[in-house]
Image (tube, rainbow, N blue to C red):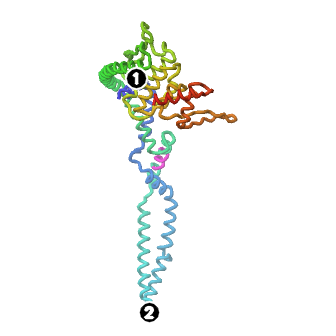
Amino acid sequence: TYKNLNQKYLSLTKEELTDEQLDFYLAQLEEIEELDLENFDEEEFLKERNNLLNYEKNSQHIKNYKALMDSSKGIMDLFKQSLNELSYLEIDDVKHNYDQLYDLYYTVDGINQDIYDQFSQSYFSEEHYNEVQETFFKLNKLKRKYGQTIDAIIDFKNSLIEKIELFKNRDQMIENINLKLKETENQLIYYAKKISILRKNKALELEKEVKYILNQMYLQQVQFKFDFQINDFNDNGIDNVKIIVSTNSGQPLQPLQKIASGGELSRIMLAIKAVSQNSKDGGTIIFDEADTGVSGKVAESIGYVMKKISKKQQVICITHLAQVACFANNHLFIEKEQMDNTSKVHVRLLNEKESVYELAKMISGKEITQQSIDHAKKLKEICV
């Protein structure tokens, strides 16, 4: 991707090895390559070293064993003499036992020969012993410096090779990446321009839709536009888009936050949200006091717009205006309870009678009259 290429390019142009660093890496690589670690069987090597370390002790044990077994008064000689004496017995029942002992004698003799052969094959060489010891000490040194295991040392070695290759081929690599960057950049700019055209066409549609909803909320004089400025391309393309508005005739278009009053800002944001949700089905949209700074028929128009949005999505609105609340299918009453040093918030779903009561309270304040209750009922009939 372009990001990866650019990151690699920045890394290559930023980091530059000195001759001293290169010499240091080469010395480390040479030290590691003294052992052929890729083909090194550590388990077999340690087994061989252990045998060499114990060769002298094992040799003495074999000599003692051989003396006990094969000397003129050894076990095998006495065993053979015993068999010879037993062979002269003329007892039929003993003949079977004699045959078993005879077989056992030659079995033991064969085992002895195997032991002698195996030990004789493990020929001890002082030179080979020194080579094994040197390898052992080199391996431990590498582990201390470059990693606790052979695999870790090999990984370190591979990273050294990459750094050295990078140093040797750095200029060529920078040139290649730069060419790829320019090629990718041209492609990105091409597609970013196409996306920009699509955005501008869609922006014209959205401007009309927002203006239509603003008219419904008694903002007929408001001009609403998307201002496009070309930017260096990024993840979102080449467009820097701002919303600019004019709330009065003859007033120039300016950024939204600079000129809109609280009530106007609430209605403009509601219109934008209403339009942006038109293409979506399902989900939930929350309006937190979108009716700030308005009242009367304007508030009623806001409730009407929210009602239209609710046909495609669930709408949750926090409001203090009866003209807005009357459009809801359900009313949730939220109250805060102070307990010691903590506060608890309770949310309760109101029934029909409670809904009318709360709407009446919004209309007339704390003193609820029959007139305000009748007005609340009328509002619910009209809005729902």
Residue marked by disc 1: 13
Q: Is the stretch drawn in magenta largely helix, strand or loop? A: helix
For the view shown, which residue lies furthest in the right direction? 340
Total numbered labels placed on residues in the image:
2
- Marks 2/1: CA distance? 101 Å
State the residue in front, 211 or 321: 321
The quarter of the picture where residue 24 lies is top left
State the image coordinates of residue 151 (x, y, percent, origin top left): 44, 44
State the image coordinates of residue 307 (x, y, percent, origin top left): 44, 29
Q: Is 197 left, or right, of 53 in this rendering?
A: left
User: Looking at the picture, which amino acid does disc 2 mark?
Assistant: Ile
Local SS, label 2: loop
Q: Are marks 2 and 1 in contact (CB under 8 Å)?
A: no
Q: Is residue 130 above or below residue 183?
A: below
* Residue 179, visible in the rendered structure: no
Residue marked by disc 2: 91
What's the residue at 44%, 63% (across, down)? 119
Q: Nearer the viewer, mark 2 or mark 1?
A: 1
What's the residue at 51%, 68% (across, down)? 64
Q: Is residue 105 above or below residue 303?
A: below
User: Looking at the picture, which amino acid does disc 1 mark?
Assistant: Thr
